[in-house]
Every structure is written in structure tokens, then in C-alpha cells.
């Protein structure tokens, strides 16, 4: 069965798309831990990130690096934090989170944001403009 991320990539579920190429897809997390939190997802659906062939795995990180550079240029932050957790959705993915301090990379449910559609669209546009 296709994961929610595969359904997003296929256009079956709407998202705030940042970028895509033939192998990878990036979009805003709808329950971000910080404004501008992006998920970078391989189009080839595998549950565990270390199950990808070395070239595909390296390409995923190269794609993520491009997205992180755009986030840093577009948003007020000191760095872009990275997390690979992979327990909540059975489809490998990288979290790219704008950081001002270490506590900004907190995935506790109580710390997640709920932003209005207009703000999500504005954030996505700012990041896309920096690609």
C-alpha cells in the first residue's frame, strides 16, 4: 500500500511543494516543529533510509542540501537542522528544520505548530524563490 508521502508525490493529497526532480520531492511539513520545516522524500518508497543504493542515497542528500540552502536564504535562522527519524511514516524522509537555537529541533507533539494556509503558502513561496 502506498504511503501518505507516495500519495503526496503522486498529487493525490495536496501539499505545499518546494521542489522535485526525477527521484526526490520536498514539501512543507503540515505540522512543523518550526516555520519552514521541510520534508525531503525519495520517490522510491522504502521504509528505511539506509536500504537505498549508495548512489540514490547520496542523491537524496545532495537534493536535501539544495533545499537547505534555499531555506537558510529565505528564513530567519542560524542553521538548518537535520533529523532522520522514520518512525511516524513508513517511507524514508529527511526533516530540514530552520534553527535559531538547539531547542528548536524538538519533535514533541506539544511543540508542533499549526499554521494557517496563507502562511504556509507564503513560506513555501519564499523558499522556492531562493532555489
Image: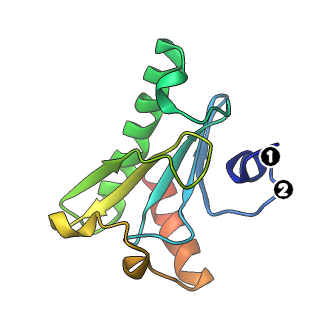
- Find the residue positioned furthest to the bottom: 116
Colouring convention used in this rendered image of the protein: rainbow
Q: Give the percent coordinates (x, y) of residue 109.
A: 43, 75
Q: CA distance from mark 1 to mark 2?
A: 6 Å
Q: Give the percent coordinates (x, y) of residue 45.
A: 67, 34
| The disc label shown at residue 78, or none | none
Q: Which residue is mark 1?
A: 10
Q: Residue at x 42, y 48 (%)?
A: 85
Say if mark 1 contacts mark 2, CB within 8 Å.
Answer: yes
Which quarter of the rendering shows the N terminus?
A: top right
Q: Give the percent coordinates (x, y) of residue 39.
A: 51, 52
Q: Residue at x 62, y 81 (%)?
A: 117
Q: Residue at x 57, y 42 (%)?
A: 41
**Residue 103 image-quadrant placement:** bottom left
| The disc label shown at residue 12, or none | 2
**Residue 113 image-quadrant placement:** bottom left
Q: Secondary structure at mark 1?
A: loop
**Residue 43 image-quadrant placement:** top right
In the image: residue 100, left or right of residue 45: left
Q: Residue at x 40, y 44 (%)?
A: 84
In the image: residue 109, left or right of residue 82: right
Q: How many residues crowd mark 2 within 10 Å: few (<14), some (14–19), many (20+)?
A: few
Compared with 116, 86 (above or below) is: above
Is 111 in front, or is 16? 111
Is 53 in front, or is 25? 53
Amino acid at each position: 500500500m502506498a504511503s501518505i508521502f507516495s500519495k503526496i508525490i503522486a498529487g493525490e493529497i495536496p501539499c505545499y511543494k518546494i521542489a522535485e526532480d526525477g527521484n526526490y520531492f520536498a514539501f512543507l511539513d503540515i505540522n512543523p516543529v518550526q516555520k519552514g520545516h521541510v520534508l525531503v522524500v525519495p520517490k522510491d518508497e522504502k521504509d528505511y533510509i539506509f536500504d537505498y543504493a549508495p548512489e540514490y542515497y547520496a542523491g537524496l542528500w545532495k537534493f536535501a542540501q539544495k533545499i537547505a540552502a534555499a531555506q537558510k536564504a529565505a528564513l530567519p535562522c542560524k542553521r538548518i537542522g537535520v533529523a532522520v527519524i522514520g518512525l511516524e511514516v513508513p517511507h524514508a524522509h529527511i526533516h530540514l528544520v530552520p534553527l535559531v537555537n538547539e531547542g528548536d529541533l524538538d519533535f514533541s507533539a506539544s511543540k508542533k505548530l499549526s499554521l494557517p494556509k496563507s502562511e504556509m503558502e507564503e513560506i513555501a513561496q519564499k523558499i522556492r524563490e531562493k532555489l
